[in-house]
């Protein structure tokens, strides 16, 4: 565990920390367990996965400068022509709104925030857009800005988003901090995603004679994000190709825990 995570745990000799996510939802978090089960992002993890949780837990709704809900809507929420983006208690957010989630699930999602920020910033460094020395300060600024968004308007945002909107917010926060010329949230890692998509299509050729149902099952184990996490310098090494193939075939001919493929096929027909 990193020194940063150890410092966080010193706040409680037992290694537990009570965190209030919003008024009415709080939980005592096992910090050591959380750090060991943090969610990597496309194979990338930050050395201090509890960074976002620590900043969130030590920042109140009174932290200034505050962000108004109008600023959140104007600068950070998706703006799609002729489409209304509503966030409220009455609007469903498939598969679920965070207000419906367990507090421990939210704590785990906070480790995703940390790792996602690091992955984006580290990629910008790799592309020559950021100095290595800028990553750590920007990590703190990104965590603080997302915290302020979460807490805006009496925690309205954190209660009513879903995982997809949260991923969108992470990219918008980075764009806000480094500028659109450095990072465009609307074109997230287009180069690496395109390379991964091309590799996935190449690997898919051998499955062309399978039934649609089996193709759908294999796709669950060989998605573009799964391929991207194994790309090296824009290509997929032979050892990683074998790993991708092994992962994809584990679903061949097997029932899945949540399996709506037959329903989808009937709808298409």
Image (tube, grey):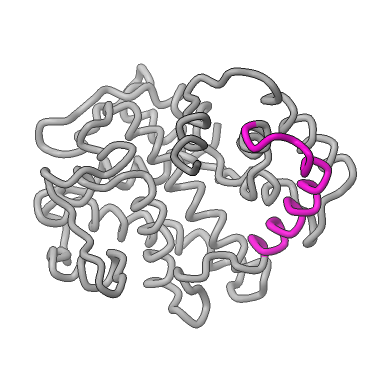
Assess whether residue 121 is covered by the magenta stretch: no
Quadrant housing residue 221: top right
Q: Nearer the viewer, residue 77 or 256?
A: 256
Counting from the top left corner in percent of width and height, residue 5 is at: 46, 35
Q: Is residue 63 left or right of residue 188?
A: left
Q: Nearer the viewer, residue 260 or 8?
A: 260
Q: Is residue 66 left or right of residue 95?
A: left
Residue drawn at x 74%, y 53% is: 201
* Highlighted range, magenta: 192-213
Q: Quadrant of the N terminus?
A: top right
- 35 shown above or below 182: above
Assess whether residue 204 is covered by the magenta stretch: yes
Q: Is residue 11 left or right of residue 263?
A: left
Counting from the top left corner in percent of width and height, residue 229 is at: 67, 47
Considering the whole magenta stretch, tell me its main secondary structure: helix
Residue drawn at x 11%, y 44% is: 90
Residue drawn at x 27%, y 72% is: 75
Residue drawn at x 37%, y 72% is: 176
């Amino acid at each position: 565990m990193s020194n940063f995570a150890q410092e966080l745990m010193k706040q409680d000799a037992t290694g537990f920390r009570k965190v209030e996510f919003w008024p009415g939802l709080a939980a005592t978090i096992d910090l050591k367990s959380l750090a060991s089960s943090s969610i990597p992002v496309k194979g990338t993890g930050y050395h201090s996965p509890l960074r976002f949780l620590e900043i969130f837990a030590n920042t109140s709704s009174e932290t200034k400068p505050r962000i108004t809900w109008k600023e959140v809507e104007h600068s950070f929420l998706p703006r799609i022509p002729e489409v209304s983006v509503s966030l409220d208690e009455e609007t469903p957010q498939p598969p679920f709104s965070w207000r419906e989630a367990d507090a421990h699930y939210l704590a785990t999602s906070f480790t995703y925030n940390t790792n996602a920020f690091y992955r984006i910033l580290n990629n910008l460094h790799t592309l020559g857009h950021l100095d290595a020395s800028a990553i750590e300060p920007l990590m703190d600024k990104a965590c603080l800005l997302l915290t302020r968004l979460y807490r805006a308007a009496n925690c309205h945002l954190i209660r009513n988003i879903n995982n997809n909107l949260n991923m969108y917010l992470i990219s918008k926060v980075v764009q806000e901090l480094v500028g659109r010329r450095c990072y465009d949230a609307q074109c997230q890692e287009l180069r690496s995603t395109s390379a991964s998509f091309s590799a996935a299509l190449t690997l898919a050729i051998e499955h062309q004679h399978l039934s649609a149902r089996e193709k759908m099952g294999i796709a669950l184990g060989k998605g573009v994000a799964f391929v991207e996490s194994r790309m090296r310098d824009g290509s997929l090494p032979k050892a990683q190709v074998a790993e991708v193939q092994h992962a994809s075939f584990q679903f061949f001919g097997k029932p899945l825990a949540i399996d709506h493929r037959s329903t989808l096929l009937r709808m298409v027909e």
